[in-house]
Image: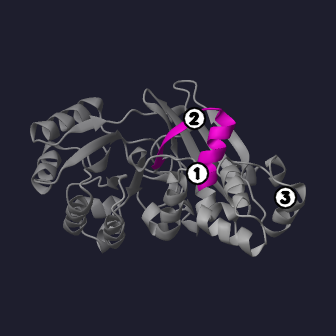
Amino acid sequence: MNLKSLTQTELAEVFKNMGQPAFRAGQVYGWLQKGIYGYDEMTNVPKSLRTVLEERYPLCPPKVVRRQESKKDGTIKYLWQLHDGNCVETVLMRYHYGNTVCISTEVGCRMGCAFCASTLGGLVRKLEPFEMLDQVAFTQRDSGLPISHIVLMGIGEPLDNFDNVMRFLELVNSEQGLNISMRHISLSTCGLVPKIDQLAAKKLQLTLSVSLHAPNDEIRRTIMPVSRAYPIEELLDACRRYYAATSRRISFEYAMIQGVNDRPQDARELIRRLKGLPAHFNLIPLNHVEESPLKPSTRADVAAFQKLLEDGGIPATVRRTLGGDIDASCGQLRRKYTKQKAEQ
Protein backbone atom coordinates (compact mmCIF):
# COMPACT_ATOMS: atom_id res chain seq x y z
CA MET A 1 0.00 0.00 0.00
CA ASN A 2 1.26 3.47 -0.88
CA LEU A 3 0.00 6.16 1.49
CA LYS A 4 -0.26 8.65 -1.40
CA SER A 5 -3.15 6.63 -2.84
CA LEU A 6 -5.22 7.11 0.33
CA THR A 7 -7.73 9.83 1.10
CA GLN A 8 -7.19 11.85 4.26
CA THR A 9 -9.97 9.90 5.98
CA GLU A 10 -8.32 6.59 5.11
CA LEU A 11 -4.94 7.92 6.19
CA ALA A 12 -6.43 8.97 9.53
CA GLU A 13 -7.54 5.36 10.08
CA VAL A 14 -3.99 4.14 9.42
CA PHE A 15 -2.60 6.56 11.99
CA LYS A 16 -5.31 5.65 14.48
CA ASN A 17 -4.31 1.99 14.21
CA MET A 18 -0.70 3.05 14.81
CA GLY A 19 -1.73 4.80 18.02
CA GLN A 20 -0.89 8.23 16.64
CA PRO A 21 -2.86 11.40 17.40
CA ALA A 22 -5.45 12.38 14.78
CA PHE A 23 -3.69 15.59 13.73
CA ARG A 24 -0.71 13.61 12.41
CA ALA A 25 -2.82 12.35 9.49
CA GLY A 26 -3.48 15.92 8.36
CA GLN A 27 0.20 16.84 8.61
CA VAL A 28 1.38 13.80 6.67
CA TYR A 29 -1.39 14.05 4.06
CA GLY A 30 -0.37 17.61 3.24
CA TRP A 31 3.23 16.56 2.72
CA LEU A 32 2.34 13.55 0.58
CA GLN A 33 0.43 15.72 -1.89
CA LYS A 34 3.39 18.04 -2.49
CA GLY A 35 5.72 15.58 -4.17
CA ILE A 36 8.38 14.68 -1.62
CA TYR A 37 11.30 12.33 -2.16
CA GLY A 38 11.42 11.03 1.40
CA TYR A 39 9.84 11.22 4.82
CA ASP A 40 12.84 13.22 6.05
CA GLU A 41 11.29 16.25 4.31
CA MET A 42 8.38 16.18 6.81
CA THR A 43 10.01 18.62 9.20
CA ASN A 44 7.02 18.89 11.56
CA VAL A 45 6.72 15.11 12.02
CA PRO A 46 8.77 13.35 14.76
CA LYS A 47 11.82 11.50 13.47
CA SER A 48 10.74 8.28 15.21
CA LEU A 49 7.45 8.30 13.27
CA ARG A 50 9.19 9.13 10.02
CA THR A 51 11.44 6.10 10.49
CA VAL A 52 8.47 3.80 11.04
CA LEU A 53 6.65 5.19 8.01
CA GLU A 54 9.72 4.70 5.82
CA GLU A 55 9.97 1.06 6.88
CA ARG A 56 6.26 0.26 6.45
CA TYR A 57 5.19 2.50 3.59
CA PRO A 58 7.94 3.36 1.06
CA LEU A 59 7.04 6.45 -0.98
CA CYS A 60 8.45 5.18 -4.31
CA PRO A 61 8.96 8.63 -5.92
CA PRO A 62 9.53 8.65 -9.68
CA LYS A 63 12.96 9.41 -11.11
CA VAL A 64 13.59 11.77 -14.02
CA VAL A 65 15.23 9.68 -16.74
CA ARG A 66 15.07 12.45 -19.31
CA ARG A 67 13.84 16.04 -19.35
CA GLN A 68 13.39 17.80 -22.69
CA GLU A 69 12.34 21.40 -23.21
CA SER A 70 11.03 22.67 -26.52
CA LYS A 71 13.03 25.53 -28.00
CA LYS A 72 9.90 26.66 -29.84
CA ASP A 73 7.31 27.05 -27.10
CA GLY A 74 8.82 26.06 -23.74
CA THR A 75 6.88 22.79 -23.49
CA ILE A 76 8.63 20.35 -21.13
CA LYS A 77 8.48 16.56 -21.53
CA TYR A 78 9.47 14.23 -18.70
CA LEU A 79 10.33 10.58 -18.94
CA TRP A 80 9.74 9.17 -15.45
CA GLN A 81 11.08 5.87 -14.20
CA LEU A 82 8.64 4.21 -11.82
CA HIS A 83 9.48 2.02 -8.82
CA ASP A 84 9.32 -1.19 -10.88
CA GLY A 85 11.59 0.10 -13.67
CA ASN A 86 8.77 0.89 -16.11
CA CYS A 87 8.65 4.37 -17.61
CA VAL A 88 5.94 6.82 -18.63
CA GLU A 89 5.95 10.31 -20.15
CA THR A 90 4.36 13.51 -18.88
CA VAL A 91 4.13 16.86 -20.69
CA LEU A 92 3.94 20.36 -19.22
CA MET A 93 2.38 22.95 -21.54
CA ARG A 94 2.19 26.69 -20.98
CA TYR A 95 -0.92 28.63 -21.94
CA HIS A 96 -2.11 32.18 -21.31
CA TYR A 97 -4.62 30.88 -18.76
CA GLY A 98 -2.11 28.79 -16.80
CA ASN A 99 0.08 25.70 -16.91
CA THR A 100 -1.38 22.38 -18.03
CA VAL A 101 0.12 18.96 -17.34
CA CYS A 102 -0.72 16.02 -19.60
CA ILE A 103 -0.38 12.81 -17.61
CA SER A 104 -0.26 9.12 -18.45
CA THR A 105 -2.69 6.66 -16.87
CA GLU A 106 -1.14 3.37 -17.99
CA VAL A 107 2.26 1.96 -18.94
CA GLY A 108 1.52 1.41 -22.62
CA CYS A 109 -1.95 1.01 -24.12
CA ARG A 110 -3.98 -1.81 -25.61
CA MET A 111 -6.39 0.25 -27.73
CA GLY A 112 -4.34 -0.06 -30.94
CA CYS A 113 -5.17 3.30 -32.60
CA ALA A 114 -3.25 3.48 -35.89
CA PHE A 115 -2.06 7.07 -35.47
CA CYS A 116 -0.77 6.82 -31.87
CA ALA A 117 2.74 5.92 -30.71
CA SER A 118 1.60 5.14 -27.16
CA THR A 119 -0.03 1.86 -28.18
CA LEU A 120 2.82 0.39 -30.22
CA GLY A 121 4.18 -1.77 -27.41
CA GLY A 122 0.79 -2.81 -26.07
CA LEU A 123 -0.30 -2.54 -22.43
CA VAL A 124 2.26 -3.36 -19.74
CA ARG A 125 0.24 -2.43 -16.66
CA LYS A 126 -2.13 0.14 -15.20
CA LEU A 127 -0.86 3.02 -13.09
CA GLU A 128 -1.79 3.29 -9.43
CA PRO A 129 -3.47 6.50 -8.19
CA PHE A 130 -0.28 7.71 -6.51
CA GLU A 131 1.69 7.25 -9.75
CA MET A 132 -0.70 9.61 -11.54
CA LEU A 133 -0.63 12.06 -8.64
CA ASP A 134 3.18 11.99 -8.63
CA GLN A 135 3.26 13.08 -12.28
CA VAL A 136 1.43 16.27 -11.33
CA ALA A 137 3.27 16.95 -8.08
CA PHE A 138 6.79 16.21 -9.30
CA THR A 139 6.29 18.06 -12.59
CA GLN A 140 5.25 21.07 -10.54
CA ARG A 141 8.20 20.65 -8.19
CA ASP A 142 10.83 20.13 -10.90
CA SER A 143 9.61 22.91 -13.19
CA GLY A 144 8.88 25.42 -10.43
CA LEU A 145 5.66 26.26 -12.29
CA PRO A 146 2.24 26.04 -10.59
CA ILE A 147 -0.08 23.53 -12.26
CA SER A 148 -3.62 24.82 -12.78
CA HIS A 149 -5.01 22.35 -15.35
CA ILE A 150 -4.71 18.61 -15.99
CA VAL A 151 -5.45 16.57 -19.10
CA LEU A 152 -5.56 12.78 -18.94
CA MET A 153 -4.39 12.38 -22.51
CA GLY A 154 -0.92 10.85 -22.14
CA ILE A 155 -0.02 7.19 -22.47
CA GLY A 156 -2.95 4.84 -21.84
CA GLU A 157 -6.75 4.84 -21.99
CA PRO A 158 -8.01 6.46 -18.75
CA LEU A 159 -11.35 4.63 -18.72
CA ASP A 160 -9.53 1.30 -19.12
CA ASN A 161 -8.07 2.05 -15.66
CA PHE A 162 -11.36 3.33 -14.30
CA ASP A 163 -11.14 2.75 -10.54
CA ASN A 164 -7.58 4.03 -10.19
CA VAL A 165 -8.35 7.09 -12.30
CA MET A 166 -11.43 7.89 -10.21
CA ARG A 167 -9.34 7.67 -7.04
CA PHE A 168 -6.69 9.94 -8.60
CA LEU A 169 -9.36 12.52 -9.47
CA GLU A 170 -10.63 12.45 -5.90
CA LEU A 171 -7.12 12.98 -4.54
CA VAL A 172 -6.04 15.74 -6.91
CA ASN A 173 -9.32 17.58 -6.30
CA SER A 174 -8.92 17.42 -2.51
CA GLU A 175 -8.88 20.81 -0.78
CA GLN A 176 -6.17 19.50 1.55
CA GLY A 177 -4.06 18.41 -1.41
CA LEU A 178 -3.33 19.98 -4.79
CA ASN A 179 -6.93 21.25 -4.92
CA ILE A 180 -7.23 21.35 -8.70
CA SER A 181 -10.80 22.04 -9.75
CA MET A 182 -12.69 19.37 -11.71
CA ARG A 183 -13.58 22.07 -14.22
CA HIS A 184 -9.85 22.36 -14.94
CA ILE A 185 -9.50 18.65 -15.72
CA SER A 186 -10.08 16.94 -19.08
CA LEU A 187 -10.34 13.18 -19.48
CA SER A 188 -9.85 11.67 -22.91
CA THR A 189 -11.29 8.34 -24.07
CA CYS A 190 -11.29 6.45 -27.34
CA GLY A 191 -14.90 5.46 -26.65
CA LEU A 192 -15.43 2.72 -24.05
CA VAL A 193 -19.21 3.03 -23.91
CA PRO A 194 -19.94 1.21 -20.61
CA LYS A 195 -17.26 3.22 -18.84
CA ILE A 196 -18.64 6.50 -20.22
CA ASP A 197 -21.95 5.57 -18.62
CA GLN A 198 -20.18 4.79 -15.34
CA LEU A 199 -18.44 8.15 -15.48
CA ALA A 200 -21.74 9.92 -16.22
CA ALA A 201 -23.27 8.39 -13.10
CA LYS A 202 -20.62 10.10 -10.97
CA LYS A 203 -21.69 13.52 -12.34
CA LEU A 204 -18.17 14.95 -12.15
CA GLN A 205 -17.77 18.45 -13.55
CA LEU A 206 -14.73 17.60 -15.64
CA THR A 207 -14.54 17.83 -19.44
CA LEU A 208 -15.01 14.57 -21.31
CA SER A 209 -12.93 14.50 -24.49
CA VAL A 210 -13.93 11.77 -26.93
CA SER A 211 -11.43 10.68 -29.57
CA LEU A 212 -13.76 10.39 -32.54
CA HIS A 213 -11.45 10.80 -35.55
CA ALA A 214 -13.99 9.59 -38.12
CA PRO A 215 -17.56 10.29 -39.26
CA ASN A 216 -18.60 6.64 -39.63
CA ASP A 217 -17.69 3.08 -38.67
CA GLU A 218 -16.27 2.22 -42.08
CA ILE A 219 -13.48 4.76 -41.62
CA ARG A 220 -13.20 4.53 -37.84
CA ARG A 221 -12.60 0.78 -37.81
CA THR A 222 -9.57 1.17 -40.07
CA ILE A 223 -7.82 3.46 -37.58
CA MET A 224 -9.47 2.66 -34.22
CA PRO A 225 -10.11 -1.01 -33.34
CA VAL A 226 -12.37 0.04 -30.43
CA SER A 227 -15.04 0.90 -33.01
CA ARG A 228 -15.52 -2.81 -33.69
CA ALA A 229 -16.74 -3.26 -30.12
CA TYR A 230 -18.60 0.04 -29.83
CA PRO A 231 -19.98 1.37 -33.13
CA ILE A 232 -20.11 5.12 -33.59
CA GLU A 233 -23.87 5.42 -33.02
CA GLU A 234 -23.55 3.57 -29.69
CA LEU A 235 -20.72 5.93 -28.75
CA LEU A 236 -22.70 9.05 -29.66
CA ASP A 237 -25.73 7.76 -27.75
CA ALA A 238 -23.48 7.37 -24.70
CA CYS A 239 -22.30 10.95 -25.22
CA ARG A 240 -25.91 12.12 -25.25
CA ARG A 241 -26.56 10.25 -22.01
CA TYR A 242 -23.42 11.79 -20.51
CA TYR A 243 -24.59 15.29 -21.39
CA ALA A 244 -28.06 14.59 -20.00
CA ALA A 245 -26.55 13.43 -16.71
CA THR A 246 -23.89 16.12 -16.27
CA SER A 247 -24.93 19.11 -18.45
CA ARG A 248 -21.28 19.19 -19.56
CA ARG A 249 -20.62 19.78 -23.25
CA ILE A 250 -18.65 17.02 -24.96
CA SER A 251 -15.30 17.85 -26.54
CA PHE A 252 -14.53 15.74 -29.61
CA GLU A 253 -10.94 15.18 -30.70
CA TYR A 254 -10.46 14.73 -34.41
CA ALA A 255 -7.03 14.00 -35.90
CA MET A 256 -6.95 15.35 -39.44
CA ILE A 257 -5.54 12.56 -41.64
CA GLN A 258 -4.89 13.23 -45.30
CA GLY A 259 -7.22 11.31 -47.60
CA VAL A 260 -8.79 9.38 -44.72
CA ASN A 261 -11.21 11.59 -42.77
CA ASP A 262 -10.68 15.13 -44.05
CA ARG A 263 -13.05 15.36 -47.03
CA PRO A 264 -16.01 17.77 -47.22
CA GLN A 265 -18.45 14.84 -47.15
CA ASP A 266 -16.85 13.69 -43.88
CA ALA A 267 -17.58 17.06 -42.29
CA ARG A 268 -21.16 17.04 -43.57
CA GLU A 269 -21.71 13.51 -42.19
CA LEU A 270 -20.43 14.64 -38.76
CA ILE A 271 -22.89 17.53 -38.79
CA ARG A 272 -25.77 15.13 -39.45
CA ARG A 273 -24.69 12.65 -36.79
CA LEU A 274 -24.12 15.21 -34.04
CA LYS A 275 -27.33 17.13 -34.54
CA GLY A 276 -28.77 18.13 -31.17
CA LEU A 277 -25.69 17.17 -29.13
CA PRO A 278 -23.90 20.16 -27.54
CA ALA A 279 -20.32 19.61 -28.62
CA HIS A 280 -17.04 21.24 -29.51
CA PHE A 281 -14.52 19.89 -32.01
CA ASN A 282 -10.77 20.01 -31.52
CA LEU A 283 -9.23 19.50 -34.95
CA ILE A 284 -5.72 18.11 -34.49
CA PRO A 285 -3.23 18.23 -37.38
CA LEU A 286 -1.86 14.67 -37.33
CA ASN A 287 1.53 14.49 -35.65
CA HIS A 288 4.40 12.42 -37.03
CA VAL A 289 4.83 8.85 -35.81
CA GLU A 290 7.68 7.16 -37.67
CA GLU A 291 6.04 3.70 -37.74
CA SER A 292 2.79 5.04 -39.24
CA PRO A 293 2.19 5.66 -42.97
CA LEU A 294 -0.58 8.16 -42.19
CA LYS A 295 -0.01 11.77 -43.23
CA PRO A 296 -1.44 15.05 -41.88
CA SER A 297 -4.06 16.97 -43.81
CA THR A 298 -2.97 20.15 -45.54
CA ARG A 299 -3.59 23.49 -43.81
CA ALA A 300 -6.08 24.38 -46.51
CA ASP A 301 -8.06 21.16 -45.96
CA VAL A 302 -8.06 21.67 -42.19
CA ALA A 303 -9.33 25.24 -42.58
CA ALA A 304 -12.03 24.15 -45.04
CA PHE A 305 -13.12 21.33 -42.70
CA GLN A 306 -13.31 23.74 -39.77
CA LYS A 307 -15.45 26.18 -41.76
CA LEU A 308 -17.87 23.45 -42.83
CA LEU A 309 -18.36 22.35 -39.20
CA GLU A 310 -18.89 25.89 -37.98
CA ASP A 311 -21.29 26.68 -40.81
CA GLY A 312 -23.18 23.55 -39.74
CA GLY A 313 -23.51 24.79 -36.17
CA ILE A 314 -20.60 22.90 -34.56
CA PRO A 315 -17.93 25.08 -32.86
CA ALA A 316 -14.49 23.92 -34.00
CA THR A 317 -10.96 25.01 -33.24
CA VAL A 318 -7.60 23.85 -34.56
CA ARG A 319 -5.41 22.70 -31.69
CA ARG A 320 -2.05 24.38 -31.30
CA THR A 321 0.83 21.97 -31.83
CA LEU A 322 3.08 22.20 -28.78
CA GLY A 323 6.34 20.35 -28.23
CA GLY A 324 6.57 18.92 -31.74
CA ASP A 325 10.37 19.28 -31.76
CA ILE A 326 10.62 16.97 -28.70
CA ASP A 327 7.92 14.44 -29.74
CA ALA A 328 5.58 15.78 -27.05
CA SER A 329 2.55 16.46 -29.23
CA CYS A 330 -0.73 14.56 -29.28
CA GLY A 331 -0.19 10.90 -30.23
CA GLN A 332 3.59 11.00 -29.89
CA LEU A 333 4.12 9.90 -26.28
CA ARG A 334 5.89 6.59 -25.82
CA ARG A 335 8.80 4.91 -24.06
CA LYS A 336 11.08 5.82 -26.92
CA TYR A 337 14.08 6.92 -24.85
CA THR A 338 14.28 3.69 -22.83
CA LYS A 339 13.99 1.69 -26.05
CA GLN A 340 16.93 3.58 -27.54
CA LYS A 341 18.98 3.08 -24.40
CA ALA A 342 18.31 -0.67 -24.49
CA GLU A 343 19.49 -0.85 -28.10
CA GLN A 344 22.75 0.99 -27.42
**Amino acid type at mark 3:** Arg
Q: Secondary structure at mark 3?
A: helix
Q: Is residue 190 left or right of residue 264?
A: right
Depth check: give the residue in front, 131 or 263: 131
Q: Is residue 73 left or right of residue 79?
A: left
Which residue in the protein does label 2 denote?
Answer: 146
Place of residue 132 in the rendered image (x, y in percent of width and height, measured from the top left): 58, 56
Task: Name above or below for residue 166 compared with residue 18.
Answer: above
Which residue in the protein does label 3 denote?
Answer: 50
Q: Are marks 3 and 1 in contact (CB under 8 Å)?
A: no
Magenta residues?
133-151
Q: Secondary structure at mark 2?
A: loop
Depth check: give the residue in front, 131 or 108: 131
Q: Earlier in the sequence, mark 3 or mark 2?
A: 3
Q: Earlier in the sequence, mark 3 or mark 1?
A: 3
Quadrant of res 23: bottom right
Q: Secondary structure at mark 1?
A: loop
Task: Name above or below for residue 202 compared with residue 339.
Answer: below
Depth check: give the residue in front, 216 or 291: 216
Q: CA distance from mark 3 to mark 2?
A: 28 Å
Q: Is residue 187 magenta?
A: no
What is the tally of numbered marks visible in this picture? Answer: 3
Residue 236 — which label? none
Place of residue 261 in the rendered image (x, y in percent of width and height, measured from the top left): 24, 49
Residue at the image position 48 percent from the left and 64 percent from the top = 166
Quadrant of res 189: bottom left
Which residue in the protein does label 1 denote?
Answer: 176
